[in-house]
Amino acid sequence: MTLLLNIAVDGVAYGMILFMIAVGLSVTMGLMRVVNLAHGGFALIGGTLAHWLGTEVGLPFALVLLGAVAGTIVIAMPLERLVYRRIYGFGELQQVLATIGLTFLMIASVNLWQGSSLLSITLPEGLNRSVDLGFRQLTAHRALVIGVGALVILGLWLLLDRTRFGIRLRAAVDNRDTASALGIDTGRIYMLTFALGAGLAALGGILGAELLPIDAYYPLRYMVLFLIVVAIGGLGSILGSFVAALAIGMIETASRYLVPDMATITFFAIVILFLALRPRGLMGRVGA
């Protein structure tokens, strides 16, 4: 029982990180119809800014977190307007090639600025303390990750399903020309949605640096993992991405606990079997 509880706690924390990073990719691929393989680069940018603000500028962690996420959004917005708007009209293969090119540009930029070594993100003493769960000690940092992940899924549900912005986004996705004719600024909607996804990726990259360490090659190292979350959850489904991320977190954690020598093979075998049975994922859109 203790082993199962340990797997559950570690799996949920890992899954929350995957969700925060991958949910923006699910939105851009499922709703905005762009294969953005550079999405993990925004987690890299967020983590790199957090490292710089914390170790070189010397800001406290709260300001590091806010500044890194805000900085990533500031970078993402003009990038969407100047580059991605042209990519939206490309075919799928051209989108893959263009966004892979952006990925290598991000990697090269971080490599030039901070080098290729691991980029540490210093946590305040309070987040390094342990919380007694009865069956194990859990660091306050992992408890924070779980709490923030829960707030993110709730906030996204409220934003997309209960606000005027969410209604306009769905209208722009379903028929951009008609939405524009009705007075909806679809370009602005797309830019804000893209920036939201980039900001969440940065947040996940910073909070998840303990489990998914930040270095210049971060986007390539974890690209497949983020794509798996989107594929299993279903393109464009926020809830699907959440469930998929938690399931993947549990499966990978259980594999490392139970069959450490076969963990990677076991994990990918389960993923392949699932996608063979459910190629659209858990909650994929029919038109995706």
Image (cartoon, rainbow, N blue to C red):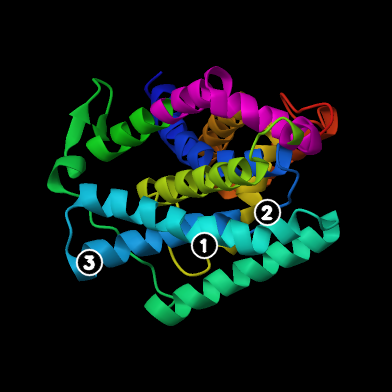
Label 3 sits on a secondary structure element that is helix
Which residue lies under the disc numbered 3? 55
Q: For the residues marked 3 and 2, what is the alpha-carbon distance in whole angstroms?
A: 31 Å
Which region is colored magenta? 151-180
Q: Is the magenta stretch mostly helix, strand or loop?
A: helix
In the picture, measured across the screen, residue 249 lies left or right of residue 206, that is right
Label 1 sits on a secondary structure element that is helix
Q: Give, as a three-letter code, the residue at label 2.
A: Asn
Which residue lies under the disc numbered 1? 218
Q: Do the residues labelled 1 and 2 touch (CB within 8 Å)?
A: no
In the picture, measured across the screen, residue 196 lies left or right of residue 178, that is left
Q: Give, as a three-letter code, the residue at label 3.
A: Thr
Quadrant where the C terminus is found in the figure: top right
Neighbor class of circle 2 (other Cα within 10 Å; few <14, some 14-19, many 20+) is many
In the picture, measured across the screen, residue 138 lies left or right of residue 13, that is left
The numbered mark, 3 or 2, whose residue comes first in the sequence reads 2
**For the point 37% across and 30% down, which residue is it?**
146
Q: Are marks 3 and 2 in contact (CB under 8 Å)?
A: no
Which residue lies under the disc numbered 2? 36
Q: For the residues marked 1 and 2, what is the alpha-carbon distance in whole angstroms?
A: 15 Å
Label 2 sits on a secondary structure element that is loop
**Closer to the camera, 88 or 199?**
88
Q: Is residue 195 above or below residue 247?
A: below
